[in-house]
Amino acid sequence: MRRLLAWNLMTLDGYFEGRAPWDLGFHETVWGDELEAFSLEQGEEIGTVLFGRRTYEGMARYWTAETGAVADMMNSIEKAVATRTLDEATWNNTRLLKGDAVESVRGLKAEDGKDVYVFGSADLLDSLLAAGLVDEYRLCLAPVVLGGGTPLFKPQDQPIRMRLEGARPLKTGGTILTYAAAG
């Protein structure tokens, strides 16, 4: 069974994007050689990158227009989109997961292969976290307070406990935090 890992950048006040969709300017506060190297390291572990529809559309627009090692990785790696509305996926190596996202992701995790990673996709992650499907959370905490935006974590009916597995400070002032599901 494959593990499901979530990777996101987040501000000190808990936002993964600013007040407008795709307002990701705070990413520049942590981006640098170390985070690029970490991204490529993660790429070696990824079997499939999982997105919700909105994140898929934004990532496809962005990465198909970029060049470099991270763009090459993102454009070549296998991708899956949990969607009820898309009829086709045009980004290289992408398949659609139609219907109930939680059940589709259970099936994806049951496949053979390397781990499944979720990038962005806070709404999708909300349902996966509530269903107990997230095995590990990797967050890059950016040293900025936005004061508003879209929160990464949504209110849950029950607390979701995590266990700190590692903390890796970056020269940019960010910190990569790794948490395992605590049971």
Image (spheres, rainbow, N blue to C red):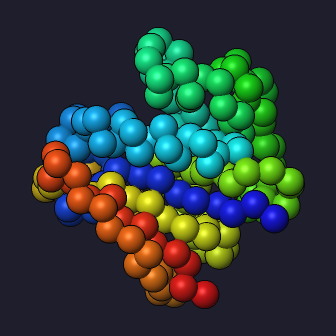
The x, y position of residue 112, in whole percent, is 86, 54
Quick check: can you spot residue 40? yes
Q: Nearer the viewer, residue 171 or 6?
A: 171
Q: Nearer the viewer, residue 182 or 54?
A: 182
Q: Residue at x 22, y 44 (%)?
A: 30
The x, y position of residue 152, in whole percent, is 39, 59
Q: Residue at x 16, y 46 (%)?
A: 172
What is the total number of numbered labels drawn onto the structure image? 0
The x, y position of residue 56, in whole percent, is 58, 33
Q: In the displayed structure, would residue 3 be above or below residue 120? A: below
Which picture quadrant has residue 48? top right
Which picture quadrant has residue 78? top right
Q: Residue at x 60, y 23 (%)?
A: 75
Q: Is residue 17 left or right of residue 67?
A: left
Q: In the displayed structure, would residue 56 be above or below residue 149? A: above
Q: In the displayed structure, would residue 178 be above or below residue 89? A: below
Q: Is residue 152 left or right of residue 98?
A: left
Q: Quadrant of the N terminus?
A: bottom right
Q: Nearer the viewer, residue 99 or 140?
A: 140
Q: Is residue 162 left or right of residue 82?
A: left
The x, y position of residue 13, in whole percent, is 21, 63
Q: Quadrant of the C terminus?
A: bottom right
Q: Nearer the viewer, residue 17 or 28?
A: 28
Quick check: can you spot residue 155? no
